[in-house]
Image: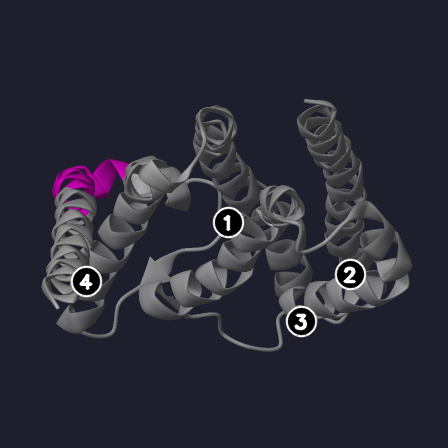
Amino acid sequence: MSEDKNSKQDLEMNITDHLSELRKRIIWSLGSFIVFFIVGFVFIRDIYGFLEKDIPIQLSVTSPGEIIWIYFTIASIIAIIVSLPMLCLQLWLFIKPALTSKEKKVSLGYIPAIFLLFVAGLSFGYTVFVQLILPFLLSLNEGMFNELFTVERYFRFVFRVTIPFAILFEIPIIIMFLTSLGIINPELLVKIRKYAYFVLIVVGTMISPPDFILQIVVAVPLIILYEVSIILSRIVYRKKLRAQQELMDE
């Protein structure tokens, strides 16, 4: 009876410790977001000027609410980007006790890779938008309409194009992580390659305007990312098999 009571108390303490640790990690993550949100808010004019200098159009506002919207939206996106490493680090610290020493080293290396790929995806998406998509859409006008671009509508459209790229550029890291967990393997990725291509092409079509060349420009990098993911999955899979073989030999 006393053993059952002690076991129940240990379980309750264990759950309490986990919840306390989770709360601590959430507080650190939110604190990081708030700090960088404030920084983004302070430097909003510089950030907006950097984004606006690349476009050949004049942006307008139709209400005071749009000014507030652009301030909060840009500051929030900057905070998400810059605080992403901190969020990943806090997640790693939360699951760290359940990892082996080797898993700790490997998983810690994912953090900078996640951040760099996210930024690379945003940069690529923004470059494609400014250099290809926007000029194509403007060329369709050819003097037929008076052009009035509001800040809110323009940046909503920009984010709709760039943010999916930032997420899709995380495919290699996701594939590596799932391979390390044993959920997928390189053979499965090769087997479903044609279906993955189809999905990526559909995504590229949804992001880009209805122009064949632009859709190819968008889809090809996504397909390359998938092929890189297969290569990385093979590397992770071989290391995993080697580690399992070493354990069996012992």
- Splitting the image into 4 quarters, where does residue 143 fall? bottom right
Mark 4 and mark 3: Cα distance apart in space: 29 Å
**What element does badge 2 sit on?**
helix
Closer-to-camera residue (11/111): 11
Image coords of residue 112 (percent x, y): 45, 29
The answer for how far apart the CA atoms under marks 4 and 2 are is: 33 Å
**Spatial CA span between label 3 and label 2:** 9 Å
Residue for point 49% across, 42% down: 118
Q: Is residue 98 left or right of residue 178?
A: left
- Mark drawn on residue 56: 1
Reading the chain from its start, which is encountered first: label 1 or label 3? 1
Instruction: Mark 3 or mark 2: name the one nearer the start of the chain.
Output: 3
Q: Residues within 10 Å of mark 3 (few under 14, many from 20)?
A: few
Q: Which of marks 1 and 2 is in front?
A: 2
> Which residue bears the numbered disc 3?
206
- Tell me the kind of residue under disc 1: Pro
Q: Is residue 239 left or right of residue 51?
A: right
Tell whether label 3 touches label 1 (CB within 8 Å).
Answer: no
Identified at 64% across, 57% down, the residue is: 133
Q: Residues within 10 Å of mark 1 (few under 14, many from 20)?
A: few
Q: Name the residue under label 2.
A: 215
